[in-house]
Amino acid sequence: MKKLLIANRGEIALRVIRTAQEMGIQTVAIYSDQDRLAPYVERASEAYHMPGDTYNETYLSVERILEIAERAHADAIHPGYGFLSENPDFARRVIDAGLTWVGPRPEALHELGDKITARRFAERAQVTPVPGISEPVSDVHTLLHFCSTHGYPAMLKRADGGGGRGITVVRTEDDVRAFFMSHDALQGGDLDKYFIEKFVSEARHVETQCGRDAAGHFTVYSTRDCSVQRRNQKLIEEAPAPFLSDSVEETLYLFSQRLFEAADYVGLGTCEFMVTAQQNVYFLEVNPRLQVEHTVSEEVCGIDLVREQLVIADGGGVSVQGRAATRGHSFELRITSEDPAKNLTPGSGVIESLHFPEGPGIRVDFGVSAGDTISPKYDSMMGKLIVTAATRDLALARVHRAISEFSLEGVPTPVGLYDEIFAHDDFTARGRSGQFNVTTKWLETTFLNTHAQAARAGQPASAGLSGGVNREVNSVEPSELGTLRANSQLGSSRDVANTTFVVEVDDRRMKISVPEYVIAAVSTSHRPIASRRTQPLRGKGMGVLGAGSGSGSGANPADGGLVGSNGEIKAPMQAVVTRVNVAVGQKVSKGDLLVVLESMKMENYVYAPVAGVISEIYVGPADGVDAGEGLLKVDVTSGTTASTTSGTTSAKKKEEK
């Protein structure tokens, strides 16, 4: 392996580039319009522009990526995580092009990528999944029979979902029938994309970081606990997974080995499980790629897992067989652009200042810097703080110190919330019970609302701000958490003899250095240029309306500007519509779910702020909407009548505008 193309962006692209450079491997980065000045682009040996700022135009464009790989003479492709990392067709195309694919075989990706086929595969490998039906949902009677047999609640999961998306929990027969209607009738019939499982409400999310080489040598590098989640997406991870019994540890290792061997898996991957209070271990899925939280495993096992990936892909073996020896304890805090005061709803904006903690046991994996714009078009995760110490208790204390030194201004972050989590008795296991009482729903039930505030039209607020608990979480101004220190390199005025410009020649990124006297000769307004440019505010003008900034004179301030006086419900953010849960003429009550939006890979729910009748619907599944754009209209005056014939569908409104 001589030249590696990283088919990804952000902090994971930078992470792979760093290890490749240490190994003497040249790197090729790809970047969209939005990522033109991203740190990973700067660090790569070469970088190529892919015009566009949508996933399909850029990081999901197989043809463009392979075209760039050929043009750059790359001999290997690392997919990172997300995007095309679990796509068997992309893996096959890479291999057919004569390139090294840094990942498992396409056949293994196919067996493990779909959640339904993964359940069937686990059963064949004698690994116990969560009780459920390993077949697509076919009719409502199948759902009702399962729930009557196993009891409520149950979980409907989309087979191709991931990262917490495509999951619906049903708690009553009415919920089951409503799910069936919305997915079978109103959405054109995507019911066969779902399967049903028993909803395990009180369980930990525990996983094993595994590796296997072509010779069949298998390794578990460490266990991890990832139970601190919101909307089934991880926020805090730690390694090794604490407070596990020897029998559970043994089961985790045995199940993981069976899965990797049955799939003839070659490469690194993660086996994910639910562990109940009764010590039952249930299989969830295999993630056939590097994961965001690989960092904590690296810290406790002392092995560079990206290097391990590249070595195995190049025909080498795992560096250790069996169970890797671990030392110390490590936490990872995902730094996302999410606001705890709004139920961790994603936000966007410009990073005005950014300062990282320093000192022993602190690792920073970030993909952004001061001056960057956080776009709603991409994932909300900006980077990660990894904190390691000799013991879990020492690591807990070090996390508080790291949080006090961290500051980020311009966009919301959950850092203030993290400070509280790491002091909570349930998490520290220092309370009266002395028990670790964190499960996958703990964060939501302890700190966040379980039901959105209907008056905000789907903009939920933090429950922790009421009930006598004054949390005062304000991550928009995280300087309160520690001393704000500006980046002293920004805006430097030190003169230089030459000025370096970044240009794109036929979409290939290049740097040219020009003497300043040349610039002075052709410019009447020449001024000395900083030795390190101040990064421009990328995405400037990409307005996103916040609460209280609704467009139109009829906006209701009490509803955050998202409900017009004419009953029009507006999108609270730039997003993609994934589900419309109502029909024209349908009566709704205050708090009923109307529309599901997806922004930054997270589902957000728009609820009815008032009772009424749906008179118009402007959008449908897969439509893109801007913040403040109308979604539908509720006729409030018809709320007490059975006006099921009034109003007509206005799905073409977007085209008429």
Image (cartoon, rainbow, N blue to C red):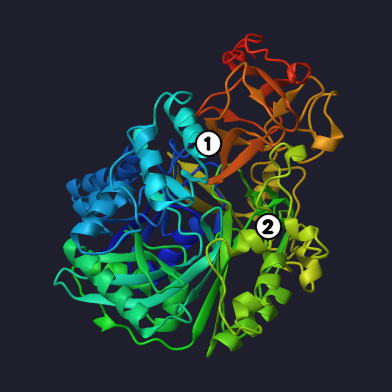
The nearer-to-camera label among 2 and 1 is 1
Q: Nearer the viewer, residue 258 or 30?
A: 258
Residue 364, how many percent across, how many down? 57, 71
The residue depicted at 38 percent of the width and 40 percent of the height is: 143
C-alpha separation, residue under disc 2 versus residue under disc 1? 25 Å
Q: Label 1: few (<14), some or many (≥20) within 10 Å?
A: few
Please name the residue that numbered disc 1 is placed on.
174
Q: Nearer the viewer, residue 499 or 647?
A: 647
Residue 79, how many percent across, how many down? 36, 54
Q: Amino acid at mark 1?
A: Asp
Q: Amino acid at mark 2?
A: Leu
Residue 108, how many percent across, how many down? 22, 55
Please name the residue that numbered disc 2 is placed on.
448
Q: Nearer the viewer, residue 639 or 114?
A: 639
Instruction: Give the quarter of the image for residue 13.
Output: bottom left
Badge 2 marks a residue whose secondary structure is loop
The residue depicted at 25 percent of the width and 43 percent of the height is: 89
